[in-house]
Amino acid sequence: MYIYDLHAEDGSLRAFEVENILLSRRRACKIVESITGATIVRRTRIFRDTDDFCEFTLDGFNFIIEEPFGDNSRYWVGSKDAAGSTVLPKVREAFQNHKTLEAPLRLLAMLLFLLVAWFAYPRVMAFVAQDRCLDAGRSWNAVLQTCNQSNQL
């Protein structure tokens, strides 16, 4: 999962954004729950019209996760107060280490590619044979998919 860091003017980590294509709001809250010492204060129920959907505390600091504008390609994760930026790398590490569906999706893509190749191979080879036959000045029998030696049908 790709993470976009947002730094303060002094270079410290102020917040970060995480892509939500393969990460649901519920899964983001589950990642927070997996952090040692983190406590979920509030999580938004389904169909609630708020951008911030998860509020949690970690080491005495309050954090929120929100989806800006309610429809964005990234979730924003940050502290409610500037002092929480010292603990934020711990939260970022939990999101960085979380493996979404990357491996299963790669496997699915590979299987899909092999399936397409399996069905396309005979057609491609027939096309190549037909092309070679016609380039040699011979005739192609489409029914038998063979090359006739003469130009006559």
Image: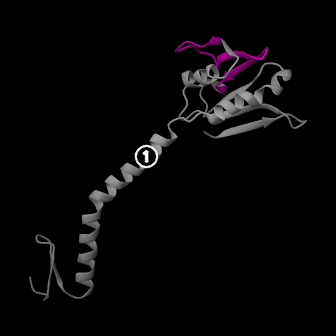
> x%, y% of residue 119?
27, 57
Q: Is residue 140 left or right of residue 135?
A: left
Q: Residue furthest front?
A: 36
Q: Which residues are magenta?
A: 41-68
97 in relation to 144, above or below: above
Relative to 123, say whether 111 is above or below: above
At x 86%, y 21%, the residue is: 83
Give, as a three-letter code, the residue at label 1.
Leu
Left or right relative to 149: residue 66: right
Classed neighbour count for the residue bearing mark 1: other residues with Cα under 10 Å, few (<14), some (14–19), many (≥20): few
Residue under the image location 71 percent in, 31 percent down: 92
Q: Is residue 64 magenta?
A: yes
Which residue position holds label 1?
A: 107
Q: Position of residue 125 (x, y in %)?
A: 27, 70
Q: Is residue 7 magenta?
A: no
Q: Quadrant of residue 136?
A: bottom left
Report x, y in % for residue 15. Answer: 76, 30
Tell me the quadrant of the picture where the C terminus can be found.
bottom left
Q: Tell me which corner region of the image, top left, top right, bottom left or bottom right, holds residue 1.
A: top right
Q: Nearer the viewer, residue 137 or 96?
A: 96
Q: Residue at x 67, y 26 (%)?
A: 68
User: What is the quadrant of residue 24 in the picture?
Assistant: top right
Residue 85, given in percent of the width and then of the height, sits at: 82, 26
